[in-house]
Amino acid sequence: MVGIVSIDIEPGGSATPVGYIGICEVSAEGVGQPALIRFRSPLCQDPWEDWVAACEDYLDMVHSTRSTTERERLQNRWDVSDDVEQHNRLFGFSPIPDPFPQAEYRRPEPEPFAQVWPQLALRLAGKIITAYNASYDQAALDGLLQATHLPMANFRWLDGRAVARNYKYWVGQYGSPTEKLWRELFDWEDYSEGDTEYRGERLQDVTLRLELFTGEQARLRALAHREWGIGNKALLRDAAEDAWANAEIIAAALRSEGLPVTTDGIDILDAVIVDPDPTVYPAHQTHLASIEPIDPVCAQFLTTRAQAQVDRCISRICGIHLSPNQWTEVYAVWESAARWLMRLVGVSELEQASALAAEADRLIQASHSVLVCHQRGKVYADALWCWLEANRKQLAFHGLTDEEIKAQINRLCADEEQDRAQRRRRKRTH
């Protein structure tokens, strides 16, 4: 059974010597407890003491502009541990018992990334790595490894944001639940965290739509962020919570499809993101069809998906008039899906042709249902061509020669001409 690890990387920078990696595992038992790894960022070359002194100078400057009361409040903003009950209400499930006993620059200097990474790399080895907007975290990790002259990591990545987009975890009545909450709490003040292009797509918006926080928890966290400066975002406080929220997204997606936490399950989830929905549009699911499942639950999922694609092609053919070119396109999808289905249910190559011929009966019936609705003109001519072509495909599956197929098609044309005459007579009598 494969492991899935959700991570969030805050690499630090040229002016920020502290970096963070949040990790949270997803297993068959569910989402695990998140953890936060703190490290000295190799991207900042300034001495630690210089950064601490700069932070102290900045705090002194801020204090000088405030009254005594405001200064006391500012000094205490980093320490909420006095009120244990309030602290537990705010951060009860957090992996860090007391997230801000003091400002970051007052804490001890962490170990360099080069010392932290080897142990973490062992923990991540052989796992599927997922992150929200994974391209950023992948680039951040590569940058850290390059800066410390360590070998590049070769992980398989799964993008949590792409999963959330596919399952519409941010589609709702409001563009951004976080913005709505912010406006409710602070008298509709402007809230513009992040680009407006992605408003409603942020990780904390998805956590609200998945109801990872209760309404009361969300309000308390937003107030703590606004009033005390706790957390780097309104709801999710640090990299560990970002990793936890993304892990919940992956777990929710697997649950919604009934997929296990296995390699097959992740392969399917990855493919579902890019393949079309078979119940909406008849287009072949190339990525899913390439999966050879071992897990029986995944095999059943793919079988259901292939059957849905076959059914969608049939409904497309019988539900609307198609030109010969359109019918040919739908048929190509139908045949690919039908062959995929046969392979999944264990039909051998030798038996596949006869099985496809039997399955083609539905194709013929669907095409004929359109044919009998028309009596003349181009629409009838197109419907006749489609029906004859469906029969031609079935005869080819039966192994008939070209001459034999031609004779059968001529007979079907003659029978159809008689049937059409009868249909027209019945229509006149009514």
Image (cartoon, rainbow, N blue to C red):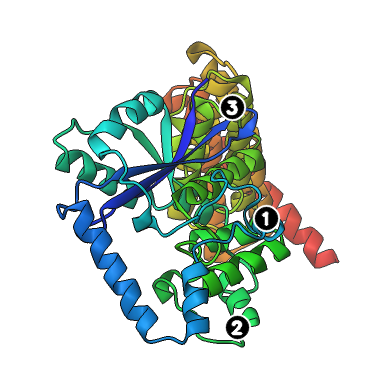
Q: Residue at x 69, y 57 (%)?
A: 89
Q: In this view of the protein, which residue sits in the foreground, 218 or 295? A: 218
Residue that label 1 marks: 84
Q: On the picture, is 339 further left or further right than 13?
A: right
What kind of element bears circle 1?
A: helix
Q: Residue at x 54, y 87 (%)?
A: 189
How far, Cα to Cα, is label 2 from label 1?
A: 25 Å
Residue that label 2 marks: 186
Q: Residues within 10 Å of mark 2 (few under 14, many from 20)?
A: few
What kind of element bears circle 3?
A: helix
Amino acid on which disc 2 is placed: Phe
Where is residue 144 drawn, in percent x and y? Answer: 23, 43
| 114, above or below 423, in the image | above
How far, Cα to Cα, is label 1 from label 3?
A: 47 Å
Q: In this view of the protein, which residue sits in the foreground, 3 or 370? A: 3
Q: Is residue 148 visible?
A: yes
| 394, above or below 102, in the image | above
Asked whether disc 2 touches disc 1, contact meaning CB atoms under 8 Å apart, the reply is: no
Residue that label 3 marks: 298
Marked residue nearer the N-terminal end (1 or 3): 1
Amino acid on which disc 1 is placed: Val
- Mark nearest the camera among 2 and 3 is 2
Where is residue 389 drawn, in percent x and y? Answer: 50, 41
| 368, above or below 306, in the image | below
- Mark nearest the camera among 1 and 3 is 1
- Mark nearest the camera among 2 and 1 is 1
The image quadrant of residue 157 is top left
Amino acid on which disc 3 is placed: Cys
Q: In this view of the protein, which residue sits in the foreground, 395 or 263? A: 263
What kind of element bears circle 2?
A: loop
Q: Residue furthest front?
A: 68
